[in-house]
Image: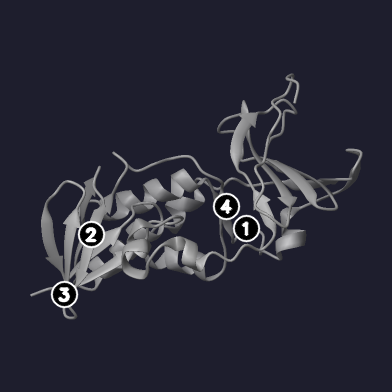
Amino acid sequence: MSRSVLISGASIAGPALAYWLNRYGFAVTVVEKASAVRGGGYPIDMRGPAVEVLRRMGLEETVRARHVATRRLTFLDGDGDVLNSVAPTVITGDEAGYDIELARGDLTSVLYDAVRDDVEFRFSESIAALEDRGDRVDVTFSSGRSQTFDLVIGADGLHSKTRSLALGPEEEFHRYLGYCFAGFTMPNYLGLSHEGMSWAVAGRSASLYAAGDGDRDQVHGVPGVHSRRRALLRVRRPGRAA
């Protein structure tokens, strides 16, 4: 009888882990609180060993077909003047033509499609309670149903409910490092394409990133500040007063 594994989270880590566990004979169930696999998100770099993993999964060509192909990164000084523009490989040391960059949502959908027929996915479902019995874990779901698994794995990312149930409130593990960042999409008023632009002065930074031509009307924006205390980032929309 195969051992049963419950994975919480159907983004990237969850389906990837489900693929390998299923391949080695485990009975896998994945729960996801969203109603379907979610798209969007910042692009992800697949380098070195990650590309080899995709190859072993038989997914390299599928993922490579969605490669973003960033052409340049431009750095600005405090006044917004260009300091320099370079190819991404100059900074990352990546091997041109080998490493892959693609939108997070694209990677999620590829991984999900690779395993959806072999693994049970339960959407609009999440873990409400865990009871570790040593040789098994009794799980109560948000729907009210209960089930026992040999192993439960949390792959539900930031503010993981699974982690808090197993280890305690996340506040006990916070280690503030002095920097606050925010990520969002915004209008592509500079007409960027396959490129990134970064501005920085002491204690403050802002970056814009256009992930290919999939959506020419939007770019990813990432402002950041250095602060001794957690700060609330307030972003001014173009054409509006602060």
- Tell me the quarter of the image containing the C terminus: top right
Residue with the mark numbered 2: 129
Q: Where residue 204 sits in the image (x, y, percent)? A: 79, 48
State the image quarter where residue 216 is shown: top right
For mark 3, give the secondary structure. Answer: loop
Disc 4: CA contacts within 10 A as few (<14), some (14-19) or many (>=20): some
Q: Tag 3: residue type?
A: Arg
Residue with the mark numbered 3: 136
- Nearer-N-terminus badge (2/1): 1
Q: Where residue 146 sits in the image (x, y, percent)? A: 11, 57
- Res. 73 visible in picture: no
Q: Tag 4: residue type?
A: Glu
Please tell me whether mark 1 or mark 3 is closer to you in this view.
3
Q: Where residue 52 sits in the image (x, y, percent)? A: 48, 69
State the image quarter where residue 48 is shown: bottom right
Please tell me whether mark 3 or mark 2 is closer to you in this view.
2
Estimate the spatial distance between the alpha carbons at disc 2 and disc 1, rounded to whole Å. Answer: 46 Å
Q: Tag 2: residue type?
A: Ala
Q: Are marks 3 and 2 in contact (CB under 8 Å)?
A: no
- Res. 33 visible in picture: yes
Disc 3: CA contacts within 10 A as few (<14), some (14-19) or many (>=20): some
For mark 1, give the secondary structure. Answer: loop
Please tell me whether mark 3 or mark 4 is closer to you in this view.
3
Q: Tag 1: residue type?
A: Gly
Please tell me whether mark 2 or mark 4 is closer to you in this view.
2
Marking on residue 97: 1
